[in-house]
Image (cartoon, grey):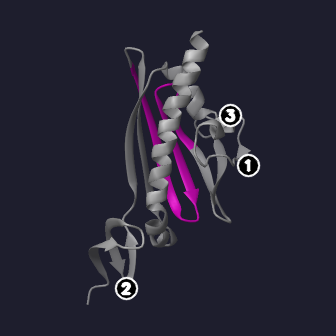
């Protein structure tokens, strides 16, 4: 009998279908990978300023309100921050580290939590007055992360989508106000 096997099924409790791996009777999902692209009518430097100002993230980012620590050199490469994710009564701490920072071009933020580690990549391009952000988020969950991913994955994807939509609206509104 094999200890590891692939599986795919309809998760009735969560209304979503997913595939993953099974180890010794324990089912867990494969690592999550989310890619999005957003076009924002604002210069890349203004969009960069919004994305990298963690102290004001609550103004546009769903659920990104609790940063107990942001190093003074954020968003320079090597800078650190701590973000707490609120899930009901739970507070899950994520340690953030900037692994690449090229203003208005590229931002890579590594994260680590009790669920494993991940990476967010923001790549900026600019053409005809529009900044395009290519967003890529991936994770490498540990065993605990693999066990809870089916519970939180759809909620996190919805949160990412809402955050990106609000980023676009926020940047475009502020760009219009600065143009006046």
> Magenta stretch containing residue 107, yes or no?
yes
Which residue is situated farthest in the top direction here?
Answer: 180
Quadrant for the N terminus, please: bottom left
* In contact (CB < 8 Å): disc 2 and disc 1: no
Measure the C-alpha gap from mark 3 to mark 1. Answer: 15 Å
Q: Residue under circle 2?
A: 25
Measure the C-alpha gap from mark 2 to mark 1. Answer: 39 Å
Rendered view: 154 above or below 180 = below
Given residues 106 and 20, the one toward you in this image is: 20
Relative placement, left or right, of 150 versus 110 is: left
Relative placement, left or right, of 116 versus 7 is: right
Tell me which label, 2 or 1, sits earlier in the chain.
2
Measure the C-alpha gap from mark 3 to mark 2. Answer: 46 Å
Residue drawn at (38%, 41%) of the image = 36
Q: Residue under circle 1?
A: 68
**Which type of secondary structure does the marked residue at label 1 adopt?**
loop
Which residue is situated farthest in the bottom direction here?
Answer: 1
> Magenta stretch containing residue 106, yes or no?
yes
Tell me which label, 3 or 1, sits earlier in the chain.
1
Identify the magenta region. Answer: 98-126
Q: Quadrant of residue 49?
A: top right
Main SS category, magenta section: strand
Which label number is shown at residue 73?
3
Q: Residues within 10 Å of mark 1 (few under 14, many from 20)?
A: few
Residue drawn at (32%, 66%) of the image = 18
């Amino acid at each position: 009998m094999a200890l590891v096997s692939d599986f795919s099924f309809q998760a009735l409790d969560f209304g979503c279908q997913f595939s993953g791996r099974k180890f010794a009777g324990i089912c867990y999902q494969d690592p999550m990978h989310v890619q999005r692209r957003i076009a924002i009518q604002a210069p890349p430097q203004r969009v960069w300023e919004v994305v990298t100002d963690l102290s004001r993230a609550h103004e546009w980012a769903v659920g990104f309100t609790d940063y107990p620590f942001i190093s003074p050199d954020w968003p320079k490469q090597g800078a650190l921050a701590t973000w707490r994710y609120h899930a009901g009564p739970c507070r899950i701490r994520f340690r953030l580290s900037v692994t690449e920072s090229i203003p208005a071009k590229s931002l890579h933020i590594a994260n680590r939590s009790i669920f494993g580690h991940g990476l967010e990549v923001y790549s900026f391009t600019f053409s005809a007055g529009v900044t395009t952000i290519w967003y890529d988020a991936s994770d490498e969950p540990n065993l605990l992360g693999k066990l809870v991913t089916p519970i939180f994955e759809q909620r996190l994807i919805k949160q990412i989508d809402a955050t990106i939509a609000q980023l676009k609206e926020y940047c475009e509104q502020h760009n219009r106000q600065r143009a006046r």
